[in-house]
């Protein structure tokens, strides 16, 4: 997978994770958590979840 594509996936997952954690609106929080879970499944399927965790630590 291209480095640019990985970067975009990581940014998207990070965005939804942040929104889910910071949301005070329960509906929006649930929506973002669902998106976060879906992104996690994509990262797992592509076998890059460990790289994502490493990327988060470096941020």
Image: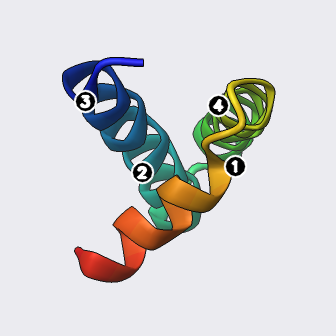
Dot in front, 3 or 4: 3
Can you say whether 11 is above or below 46 in the image?
below
**Residue 58 position in % (x across, y down):** 27, 78
**Residue 36 position in % (x across, y down):** 65, 40
Mark positioned earlier in the residue sequence (3 or 4): 3
Secondary structure category for the residue under label 1: helix
Query: Which residue is label 2 attached to?
Result: 14
Mark positioned earlier in the residue sequence (3 or 2): 3
Query: Which residue is label 1 attached to?
Result: 26
Whether residues under marks 4 and 1 lie with C-beta atoms below 8 angstroms apart, the answer is no
Q: CA distance from mark 3 to mark 2?
A: 16 Å
Query: Which residue is label 4 attached to?
Result: 39
Mark positioned earlier in the residue sequence (1 or 2): 2
**Residue 3 position in % (x across, y down):** 25, 30
Q: CA distance from mark 4 to mark 1?
A: 20 Å
Secondary structure category for the residue under label 4: helix
- Residue 8 is left or right of residue 16, and the answer is left
Mark positioned earlier in the residue sequence (3 or 1): 3
Estimate how packed mark 4 is, as few (under 14), some (14 to 19) or many (20 or more) residues with alpha carbons within 10 Å. many
Dot in front, 3 or 2: 3
- Residue 37 is left or right of residue 13, and the answer is right
The answer to whether one can see residue 24 in this image is: no
Q: CA distance from mark 3 to mark 1?
A: 34 Å
Estimate how packed mark 3 is, as few (under 14), some (14 to 19) or many (20 or more) residues with alpha carbons within 10 Å. few
Q: Residue at x 30, y 19 (%)?
A: 2
Q: CA distance from mark 1 to mark 2?
A: 19 Å
Secondary structure category for the residue under label 2: helix
Quadrant for the C terminus, please.
bottom left
Q: Residue at x 78, y 37 (%)?
A: 44
Whether residues under marks 3 and 1 lie with C-beta atoms below 8 angstroms apart, the answer is no
Estimate how packed mark 1 is, as few (under 14), some (14 to 19) or many (20 or more) residues with alpha carbons within 10 Å. few
Query: Which residue is label 3 attached to?
Result: 3
């Amino acid at each position: 997978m291209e480095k640019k594509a990985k970067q975009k996936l990581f940014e998207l997952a990070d965005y939804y994770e942040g929104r889910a954690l910071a949301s005070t609106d329960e509906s929006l929080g649930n929506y973002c958590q669902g998106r976060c879970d879906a992104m996690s499944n994509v990262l797992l399927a592509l076998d890059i979840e460990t790289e994502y965790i490493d990327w988060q630590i470096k941020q």
